[in-house]
Image: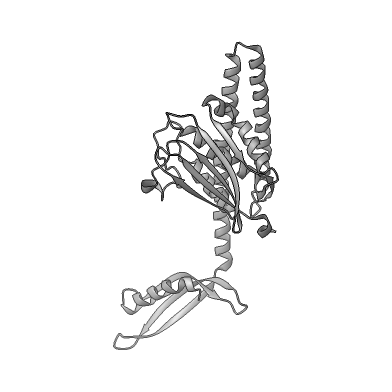
Amino acid sequence: MHAEDLSKISDMISSLIALTKRTDQAEIRFLHQKGYYIWTMLNLSMVHDDLGKPNYLIFQLKDIDERIKNRQLIKAQNSRLQNFAHIISHNLRSHSGNIHALAEMAINEPELEEKNHLMAMVKNTSSRLLETLENLNEIVKMQQQYPVATSVIMVEKEVKRVLDILAASITQCNAVIELDIPYQEEVIFNPAYFESIIINLVTNAIKYKHPQRDPLIKLTMRCTEGFKQLIITDNGIGIDLTLHKDKIFRLYKTFHHHPDSRGVGLYLVKQQIEELGGSISVESRIDDGTRFILSFPNKDLQI
């Protein structure tokens, strides 16, 4: 039997010996004669002698490997569908919000030159929205595939594209963005997921800016053992990790009293990067900003 299931069987046997149960049942992995583990439904019974003492055990195994794999597949598909729904509601709101803000700024701008500049930004942001919709359409097409399809992403180029989408929000709060990403740096990832991750983390940095200073958001790239890391640092109000570290990536958990807080963004980021073999960690202190470290599997390891 699989090492991880030994304690489960031990507990079953203990219950039978103690006469708290006559039979017991559990899903247990056993080693197939061909060298791989399969899931079984184990029915375990204890036979007692005439004096009522435990005599011997009867193991009955039923192969349920296909059922378990189907269940795991359905769970993964449901998770991806939920992920997709969050992308639709969260990311498209960012696009539409920025287009609306730029349009209002253009309408109220008296200077013709600046008005034309703002309208050009509206056009650019709407073009980015069309690109996002195309990426989302690709996700719809591949919902029946597993794992999620990936492609080569030029990190600096894609980050700049997302910053164009968020141009209105960046301008309105006087945010300064600093990039330290080599232009040739690339990762293998899903384009819609990558856009979603950057939108969520940059909008969070803007949303939770410090009231006494303009936002400063830095995006840097570095390589470590087996991973490429994108680090997003801000100078915002920070998060009290002594209170919230275990809850920070949970769904519907919020840590500040902001009217736009939904508790979805960080949950979504974690789901997306972990689904494709990466990870995310956070460092933060109250009034001293936050740093998110995104680790993407190295390209050479994925091929």
Residue 63 in which image quadrant: bottom right
Q: Is residue 284 above or below residue 53?
A: above
Residue 15 in which image quadrant: bottom left
Q: What is the number of callouts on the image? A: 0
* Residue 206 visible here: yes
Q: Position of residue 269 (x, y in %)?
A: 54, 45
Q: Position of residue 293 (x, y in %)?
A: 53, 48
129 on left or right of 78: right
10 on left or right of 185: left
Q: Is residue 295 above or below residue 69?
A: above
Task: Residue at 44% x, 46% y: name it.
Answer: 248
Q: Residue furthest left?
A: 51
Q: Quadrant of the C terminus?
A: bottom right
Q: Position of residue 254 (x, y in %)?
A: 42, 40
Task: Residue at 34% x, 88% y: name it.
Answer: 49
Q: Position of residue 140 (x, y in %)?
A: 65, 44
